[in-house]
């Protein structure tokens, strides 16, 4: 393949006019271009981030003239045009979407593109062209448009949770159906409740953020100037939809603190979105104005009435119930807060990821799914985007942890680095090697040790097999924290996140009885008080069998974080013997 060219010019009418006369390809050849204002003079009123826009066109010069007439882009100062003798329309669409994703993930620029549906279509010699994309990236990085390497960007939550994603087929079908249904409901004034269900790694959080950005872009749309007819959702960028969505109040509800903070960072850097759109369930319950639409990520982590993590939240829970329902009805959950405060709801969930008694009861989740199916508003995601072992691995892990009665036949997963270790130190050493090679390799564990270091930073929490380790020293964005490689993450720091490699310590809270041939829960070795806390107000008392379901769900989540591999160290010898049949290295 020939080498590409990178043209640079000032983003002015005179410069574009003169440039267009230099080469016929500038008016009749598929190209990708970038507009930015990195070279503008800094003034107090300037945005905190520089802006950038990425596009593709067969007539670059003509497209520049259109952009110069745009209020949204006339403040930009520089044009960069990527040309190649072997580029075609498909290549340019792919390169355009690649650069948008990488720029959004790097976070140096505010990406001004709309979210009309990034193309992810196959075409002739795509792999060869994609190798060239990396060369384009390197050239643009040398020009200062990127601040980090490709692996560094791809490992960052800004990239992983960016709304600029190429959707899988089942994701695209779900989003299109949701848009069509929502538009119809707005026209008729009908309320709606939708459920998007998927295993770990099927992209539920990405869809939630994607829909938020898309709806905001549809509401802000003033013209179809920047909307390509080849994009997935171009036909929604019309005046009728814009009018329906004007003054449309939306929010995304994220029950988990760490995940909520990561999503908030994305919203701060995404035009059309803002940090105040990312909400706790309590903020929804206390909101003065109702919402038109609430999207609830990890909806299975909404709370029922139970003892909260902080005393004042117990009072807030009661007050919200009284304000919304006239009485402190103990049967009301945060799910009812969501429905009471919004006309439309989208719940994203996995019924098998409840990890605490306070989580939404499984019967509530199953009823929500059944009602959505009855209304034909249920969408099932099946494409596995996280674990390279594939969707079968998720089901395999869950069945193995359920015990011999449910266990499948032992299997291997080609290309997936799945190993068990006899020594924790050896596993930690391998995790360090994988982190140096790929990044995002971390140790994680169940709640089988007290969190002594929370109050005494000099204390160690996990002293095992000659190793001395501490729990995560931060609850927010722990995975990317400076000390993460030397610490052990809990379920609340990793649920909803990706790792490249997960080193899972299965503590003595989960054991195996070789005589009875069953997996069981050891209450004396479990130190998450709220993970087994009874609920006298609701008359709920949790037996060892009840808590076993939460604990096996925790370990299933931990064992499905790793994209490239999962390593296991198991404390209980009989459990180790049982699991060795099923988790054998196949890399």
Image (cartoon, grey):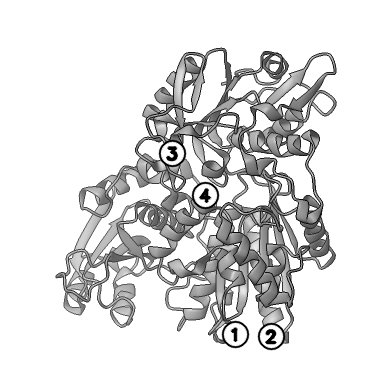
4 or 1: mark nearer the eye = 1
Q: Are marks 1 and 2 in contact (CB under 8 Å)?
A: yes
State the SS at label 2.
helix
- Percent of width and height locating residue 481: 38, 41
Query: Would you say residue 383 is visible in this rendering?
Result: yes
Expressed as whole percent of the image width and height from the top left, the position of residue 439 reads 40, 34
Upstream in sequence: badge 4 or badge 1: 4
Residue 271 picture location, percent across and down: 40, 69
Q: Earlier in the sequence, mark 3 or mark 4?
A: 4
Residue linked to disc 3:
455
Residue depth check, mark 1 versus mark 3: number of the one nearer the observer: 3
Q: Nearer the viewer, mark 4 or mark 2?
A: 2
Give the residue at mark 4: 123
Work out whether mark 4 precedes mark 2 in sequence or the reverse, and give the earlier one.
4
Choose between 280 and 312: the one closer to the eye.
312
Q: CA distance from mark 1 to mark 2?
A: 8 Å
Whether residue 211 sits left or right of residue 335 in the image: it is left
Count residues near mark 4 (Cα–Cα under 10 Å), then give few for <14, some for 14-19, many for 20+: few
Find residue 354 and report its horizontal and vertical position in percent: 69, 46
Q: Earlier in the sequence, mark 1 or mark 2?
A: 2
How crowded is the residue under tag 1: few (<14 C-alpha within 10 Å), some, or many (20+)? some
Residue closer to the observer: 547 or 232: 547
Q: Secondary structure at mark 3?
A: loop
For numbered disc 1, what is the local secondary structure?
helix
Q: Which residue is mark 2?
A: 187
Viewport quadrant of the C terminus: top right
Q: Decide if residue 213 is in sight here.
A: no
* Residue at 53% from the left image edge and 64% from the top image edge: 117
Q: CA distance from mark 4 to mark 2?
A: 39 Å
Front: mark 3 or 4: 3
**Where is mark 1, residue-wise?**
244
With 508 as the anchor, is 362 left or right in this view?
right
């Amino acid at each position: 393949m020939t080498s590409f060219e990178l043209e640079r010019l000032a983003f002015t009418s005179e410069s574009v006019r003169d440039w267009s006369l230099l080469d016929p390809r500038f008016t009749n050849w598929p190209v990708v271009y970038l507009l930015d204002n990195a070279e503008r003079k800094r003034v107090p009123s300037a945005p905190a981030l520089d802006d950038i826009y990425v596009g593709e066109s067969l007539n670059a010069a003509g497209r520049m003239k259109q952009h110069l007439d745009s209020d949204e882009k006339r403040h930009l100062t520089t044009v960069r045009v990527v040309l190649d003798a072997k580029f075609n329309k498909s290549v340019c669409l792919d390169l355009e979407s690649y650069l948008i994703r990488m720029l959004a993930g790097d976070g140096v620029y505010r990406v001004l593109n709309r979210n009309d549906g990034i193309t992810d279509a196959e075409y002739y010699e795509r792999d060869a062209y994609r190798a060239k994309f990396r060369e384009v990236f390197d050239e643009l990085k040398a020009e200062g448009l990127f601040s980090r390497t490709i692996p560094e960007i791809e490992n960052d939550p800004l990239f992983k949770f960016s709304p600029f994603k190429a959707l899988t087929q089942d994701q695209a079908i779900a989003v299109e159906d949701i848009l069509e249904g929502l538009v119809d409901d707005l026209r008729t004034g009908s309320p709606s409740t939708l459920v998007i269900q998927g295993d770990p790694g099927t992209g539920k959080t990405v869809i939630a953020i994607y829909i938020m950005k898309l709806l905001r872009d549809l509401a802000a749309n003033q013209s179809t100037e920047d909307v390509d007819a080849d994009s997935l959702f171009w036909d929604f960028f019309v005046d009728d939809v814009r009018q329906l969505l004007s003054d449309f109040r939306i929010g995304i509800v994220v029950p988990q603190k760490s995940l909520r903070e990561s999503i908030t960072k994305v919203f701060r850097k995404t035009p059309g979105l803002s940090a105040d759109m990312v909400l706790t369930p309590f903020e929804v319950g206390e909101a003065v104005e109702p919402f038109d639409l609430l999207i609830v990520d990890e909806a299975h982590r909404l709370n029922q009435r139970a003892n909260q993590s902080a005393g004042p939240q117990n009072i807030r829970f009661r007050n919200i119930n009284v304000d919304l329902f006239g009485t402190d009805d103990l049967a009301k959950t945060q799910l009812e807060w969501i429905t009471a405060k919004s006309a439309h709801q989208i719940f994203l969930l996995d019924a098998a990821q409840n990890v605490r008694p306070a989580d939404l009861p499984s019967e509530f989740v199953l009823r929500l799914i059944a009602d959505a199916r009855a209304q034909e508003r249920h969408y099932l995601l099946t494409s596995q985007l996280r674990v390279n072992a594939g969707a079968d691995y998720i089901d395999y892990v869950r069945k193995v942890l359920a015990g011999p009665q449910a266990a499948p036949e032992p299997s291997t997963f080609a290309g997936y680095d799945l190993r068990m270790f006899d020594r924790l130190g050896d596993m930690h050493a391998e995790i360090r090697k994988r982190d140096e090679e790929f990044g995002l390799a971390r140790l994680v564990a169940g709640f089988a040790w007290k969190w002594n270091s929370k109050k005494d930073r000099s204390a160690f929490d996990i002293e095992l097999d000659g190793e001395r380790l501490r729990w995560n020293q931060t609850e927010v964005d722990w995975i990317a924290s400076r000390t993460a490689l030397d610490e052990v993450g809990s379920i609340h720091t990793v649920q909803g996140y990706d790792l490249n490699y997960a080193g899972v310590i299965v503590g003595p809270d989960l054991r195996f009885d070789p005589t009875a041939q069953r997996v069981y829960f050891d209450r004396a070795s479990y130190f998450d008080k709220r993970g087994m806390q009874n609920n006298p107000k609701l008359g709920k008392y949790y037996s060892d069998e009840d808590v076993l379901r939460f604990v096996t769900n925790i370990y299933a989540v931990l064992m499905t974080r790793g994209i490239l591999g999962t390593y296991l160290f198991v404390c209980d010898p009989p459990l180790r013997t049982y699991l060795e049949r099923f988790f054998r290295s196949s890399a």
